Amino acid sequence: MSRYAEFVSNNHNQNVEELKELLRIPSISSLSEHKEDVQQAASWIADKLKNIGMENVEVVQTKGHPIIYADWLHQENAPTVLVYGHYDVQPVDPVHLWETPPFEPTIRDEKIFARGATDDKGQMFLHIKAVETLLESEGKLPVNVKFCIEGEEEIGSPHLPQFLAENNEKLSCDVVVISDSDMWDRGVPAITYSLRGLCALEVSLKTANTDLHSGMFGGGVQNANHLLVQLLSTLHDSNGKVNVAHFYDDVLELTEFEKEQIQALGFDEEKLKQQLGLTDLTGGEHNVPYPERISSRPTLEMNGLWGGFQGEGTKTVIPNQAHAKITCRLVNNQNPEKIQDLIKRHLEEQAPQGCTVSVSLGDTGNPFLTPIDSPMIQKAAEAYQDVYGKSPVYKREGGSIPIVSDFNQSLNAPVVLMGFGLPDENLHAPNEHFNLENFDKGILTICSFLEQLKS
Amino acid sequence: MSRYAEFVSNNHNQNVEELKELLRIPSISSLSEHKEDVQQAASWIADKLKNIGMENVEVVQTKGHPIIYADWLHQENAPTVLVYGHYDVQPVDPVHLWETPPFEPTIRDEKIFARGATDDKGQMFLHIKAVETLLESEGKLPVNVKFCIEGEEEIGSPHLPQFLAENNEKLSCDVVVISDSDMWDRGVPAITYSLRGLCALEVSLKTANTDLHSGMFGGGVQNANHLLVQLLSTLHDSNGKVNVAHFYDDVLELTEFEKEQIQALGFDEEKLKQQLGLTDLTGGEHNVPYPERISSRPTLEMNGLWGGFQGEGTKTVIPNQAHAKITCRLVNNQNPEKIQDLIKRHLEEQAPQGCTVSVSLGDTGNPFLTPIDSPMIQKAAEAYQDVYGKSPVYKREGGSIPIVSDFNQSLNAPVVLMGFGLPDENLHAPNEHFNLENFDKGILTICSFLEQLKS
């Protein structure tokens, strides 16, 4: 990468100044008083994309905030990369905890402080600068590049899936690259190659046609709380495994290489227990190591539970209904709708005598996995090696980012999550910042990645 | 009883007119705007007691509404009866559902309609009239009689226990008689000889020091809802029995006579199932008949249950705390404090790994039982036989009336609950009434009871 290093280094101050311009725009997508600011940030990016030489730049209006599209498609036989990012930011409360104002970007200790510095204006901007670097240095890009930058990520991307569905051909690509995640540690890059999916259910259990007085009926009639406890206690076995038939059928087991990776990364159990105030970490499957349980194994969690009287004091009521909210974290190749059906059937079959159990189905989100040994991941790894002098850590995240699998499934392309943030950069919190040591390196890594893709 | 029948019959109209006077006073104890009315009702009763020849009549002020005391103690070697009743009434809402105004007593179909007609002004007044009848006819009473009439029963008798404790000697007696309950049916008298006691607990289960995100920690750490479900599922066995060690140790089993009584009374299971909208009545102990379960057996009910998210939609939270409210209905000779301790110990011992379980203790109330074959119950039965020509039904009620066991324990005297109401007299509801067929018969039954006590 040395051949672009000088160019990037020479432009460092100018590039940082440009990022500051973008960071000054308070594009908070959740607050309607910032609607104009969000629009302004979109225009700023569209202009920037035009200036660096991207073509067909569009600011696509939605019912919410706009999506920016741009492309450069002059390498007929080379693959096409789609870059996704977002230019909207989180609110800034509590604003008094910021050392410098959130929309006045300030550099301290080689970090740039501002809302959006790392999530995601800063990281998204690296791709713009990488494309500029290549176009300025070579007059062309090694591969075809498309940009799809949205302004609603922080409010759940309500209009993006429809945009993907309606623009399937326009967005078609060989790989999607997203920089909206973390490195493993200072100097240690990371590729997040798996995210968990999600499905939600709510179960309601009803007994009599009204709450009943425990003096008149106590000991005689069914108590909805008792029956719900009985029903929910069937959902896990004594080893912490989910006790629903066929729940694990489609779970892709970790490869030996993945297990070694996870083990090699280590895990400070004592530190975590202290942080959480727990004496042990005994959720989930007892025979699976903690780092695997929270990233590579599916779960069934009761997020909410309620029935009867919750007020102060005593009420001698026999409740006639009780409820539970359930979500599962899912892993490849589990299908969220199939898992919902399995759980619904389980709850209905295990329904205790003398009550009605009804199960309603909620949100779903697919799990995401790009295998470590897939070519796109390996090219990203080579790019990191090239710039950081170090192989990246391969990370599975336990959370769910539905748009990642939306891209994956909608465009039928692998997604590579190349994070340049650091874990302590306060995203969503006061004093958000981005470490400038990853600014030039990030640009160069993306340049390298695009070059790797050519070969 | 024929020798007083004529006297009572001759005075019927006058007696009903006097009751109407009392019923016209809107002595609603729960509403502060009726404080003067409650006071006025107390004065009315005190005057009445003086007029019929009771002595040492006092209107004892409390921090709430007054308690009326009176006595007649001129039968040195005869037993002493304490009459308890109350002159306060429930509110009248929804007042538009009353056919005639609640404080304008009206007679229709040989029933007197007014708030308090059966609960308890009407029933309490029968005792005043019985004493008057005996004093007018005989110039003396067959036994010693004390009255203790309170004005706070409908708000939970907050000042009565203290009054009992502080006036133990003054109130000492051989039997307490209370008419504030029901007959079995028209023409079929009943004695309620048992009430269940009560104890309350609340259990809180805590895991981590904060709610956790199921994406980051799901499958790794304890979920308070799961552990609470696991804990609560240990409280009953598969036969519906309470699964707490020693819970049943002190339960007085029903005698063969009691079982026969309960069986003889019959029970329309189909009708009840239809009324409650239940396909079966499978609460409590599976091997105990329904009528026994709701009256003669102790229970453990989860009145409330909550943990985590209860709002609309989905929240992928791992709750760090979950709670349950529990009450038990208790029977003789269970001790509420002992049962609380047993349950507390059970919950603490069964606490799942990796959480903190804390149990707080709530209200308690003793169960009440005066054995059917006790002399006082038998004398009351003879009085009913005398007047109604029929043995009373012996009833166990599943509810709890703490003041009944307060009298029982504080004064160390048996309590006899001689009800003259009918089950459909709308107490606490619009169109409360009292059937006048039980007015003269009630007075005569009490006269007979007092005479029986002498022998």
Image: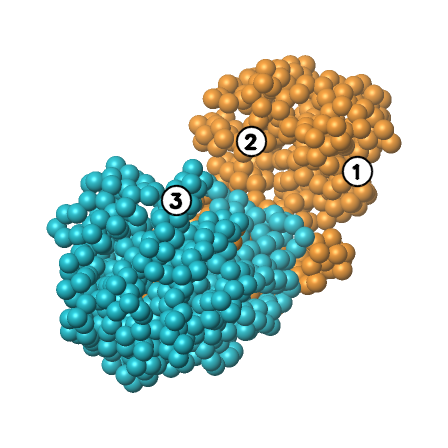
Chain colours: A orange, B cyan
Q: Earlier in the sequence, mark 2 or mark 1?
A: 2
Say which mark, if any, is on residue A155.
2
Give SS at disc 2: helix
Query: Which residue is rendered at x = 75% and y = 37% of the image?
Result: A425
User: B36 left or right of A109?
Assistant: left
Q: Nearer the viewer, residue A431 or A130?
A: A431
User: In terms of secondary structure, where does tag 3 sit?
Assistant: helix
Circles 3 and 1: CB distance less than 8 Å? no
Numbered mark located on residue A387 in the image: 1
Between A65 and B285, the residue placed more toward the observer is B285
Residue B174 rendering spot, x and y as whole percentages: 41, 75
Q: Which label sits in the foreground, 2 or 1?
A: 2
State the SS at label 1. Answer: helix
- Circle 3 sits on which residue? B40
The answer to whether B1 appears left or right of B332 in the picture is left
Mark pair 3, 2: CA separation: 65 Å
